[in-house]
Image: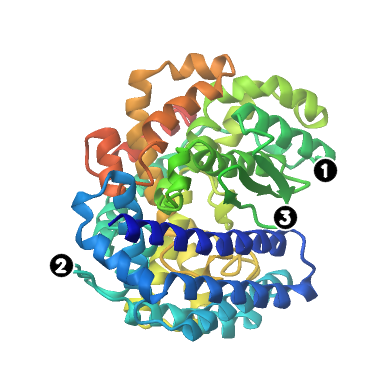
Amino acid sequence: MDDRLNNVLNTVKKEDQCLHAMRLIEFDMQTSCPEMGMNKEGELIAEIEKQAFRIRNDEKFIEDVLELYREKETLDEYERALIEKRYRTYLTEKNMSDEISHRHSLIEKQAYADWSIAKEKKDFSLFSESLGKVININRERIDLRELGEGESFACGYDILLDRFERGITVKDLDRLFDGMKERLTVLLEKIRNSKKKIRTDFLSIPATFEQQQKAADFLKELMGLDPKRSALRVCSHAFSDRMERDDVRLTTYFLPDLFTSNIYSILHEGGHSLFELLSPYEDSDWFIYDNKTLGMHESVSRFYENVLGRSKDFIRLVYPEFQKIFPQILRDVSCDELYEAVNCVTPSLIRTEADEVTYPLHILIRYELEKGIFEEGLKVEELPERWNRKYGEYLGVTPGSESEGILQDVHWSSDFGYFPTYAVGNFYNAMYIGRMKKEIDVHSLIKNGDIRGINRWMQDNVFLKADRLTPKEWIRDITGRELTCDDYMDYLEGKYSEVYEL
């Protein structure tokens, strides 16, 4: 058993070195690479992925993983987490060859390059062919997925969902989204009928690059992001990624006429980065650091962005510093006016700029479209019209261009099943915040600028076991309850009834 485990660890270490190199190149591709160089960088990433695929599909390695999986009850929790993770990878790739994997990678990198150009030129036709190919490789992933002992999926889309949120199914999401939609539409209608007027004119006053950089640096320090272990860059689509356990990269983007966009990008991506930096070092030692699901990750990023970052206590904390950084914007704006402005509910086109109340509807639209593609045969050429129709139906807005419509998100250049995790993340954090508020004085910590005190609670209760538990086990371990949308809806109804004097 020891020899088998040592071989697994040594093999996974080699694979992880390839993945580390891939992440570095992908970061460069999204932050620095000129347009004409993207295809070559994509080819390089695909070649490294091909090598990683061969490493993790070595015959002796697979044999040892399967034998250890059969004996998993004799392993400790870290060993078992590693072997279960490798077994899931085996089921995903058993029926794939390195040629198929390489082809998939090439298609995805070409699709990213095509999406970037299409978005800039506001022309879906420049991306539609690549999108069709990405849909086809996702159908291929469904067909090639091997079932484990006692495992079953009710539909093909469940397999795609499982890649990002283990154990979450269409049945789960339909229940959660139906419950959310029923209460959310009522809340949104009450807000629309409210006589409360929120001042937002100052949000569009221009801010310089230098001012926004100062705000980003201030927030990064306030959040407790170690400058020796994290780096910040600017790009067109904010994201964060873990290179290795002491190297986390996050990005933001500066909109000259919407200074709050950068602020909330930093808080969101900073939340992702804290999750990686404050997870146990053992998770990296045992190569299970990426066992966290995207729903878990989104719960943390959206906690820092919204529940913390849009709270009255947090706005009171940062307001004096923001007045210094943005004097031309906030000179005649009160703290309460800033708080109300960042919580103003206005149905809009862009998901990443959406307010808390309407944001889940952006996710619901994408979820319904993805189900349409994989369960109902919705065709690529039908997507722009269907997208626009759903935005009109759910949010009462219509895209003026495809860049602010179906081309706004990068996700479909590679994956499907990702978007629902944004909403599931909201459901998770609303559940564990209830426990947090019972155990620590969140109000006093924020008032005193002690965000690290909140980080410590998150580290001890939310981050600690995330790489070793399934999502449903994890939220049950934190809260003692099963996943529900009710806490999230209670939070929205309570907060926005006060903001809008309902």
For image coordinates 63% across by 62% down, the residue present is 21
From mark 2 to mark 3, how far is it between C-alphas? Answer: 45 Å
- Picture disc at residue 235: 3
Q: Quadrant of residue 156?
A: bottom left
Identify the image quadrant of residue 419.
bottom left
Numbered tag placed on residue 265 in the rendering: none
Could you tell me the amino acid type at mark 3? Cys
Front residue of 426 and 294 = 294
Give SS at disc 2. loop
Question: Residue at (68%, 48%) from the top-left corner?
Answer: 252
Q: Which x, y percent locates residue 93? A: 38, 75
Vertical position of residue 28 compared to residue 73: above or below = below
Judge whether 428 appears above or below 102 on screen: above
Instruction: Please indicate, yes or no, whether residue 398 appears anywhere in the rendered image.
Output: no
Q: Earlier in the sequence, mark 2 or mark 3?
A: 2
Image coordinates of residue 259 in percent, x first then y, are 72, 40
CA gap between label 1 and label 3 equals 13 Å
Which part of the image, by quadrant, shows the N terminus? bottom left
Q: Residue at x 47, y 33 (%)?
A: 307
Q: Find disc 1 in the rendering and name its residue.
A: 209
CA gap, disc 1 to disc 2? 55 Å
Residue at 47 percent across and 43 percent down: it is 192
Where is mark 2, residue-wise? Answer: 150
Q: Is residue 384 above or below residue 103?
A: above
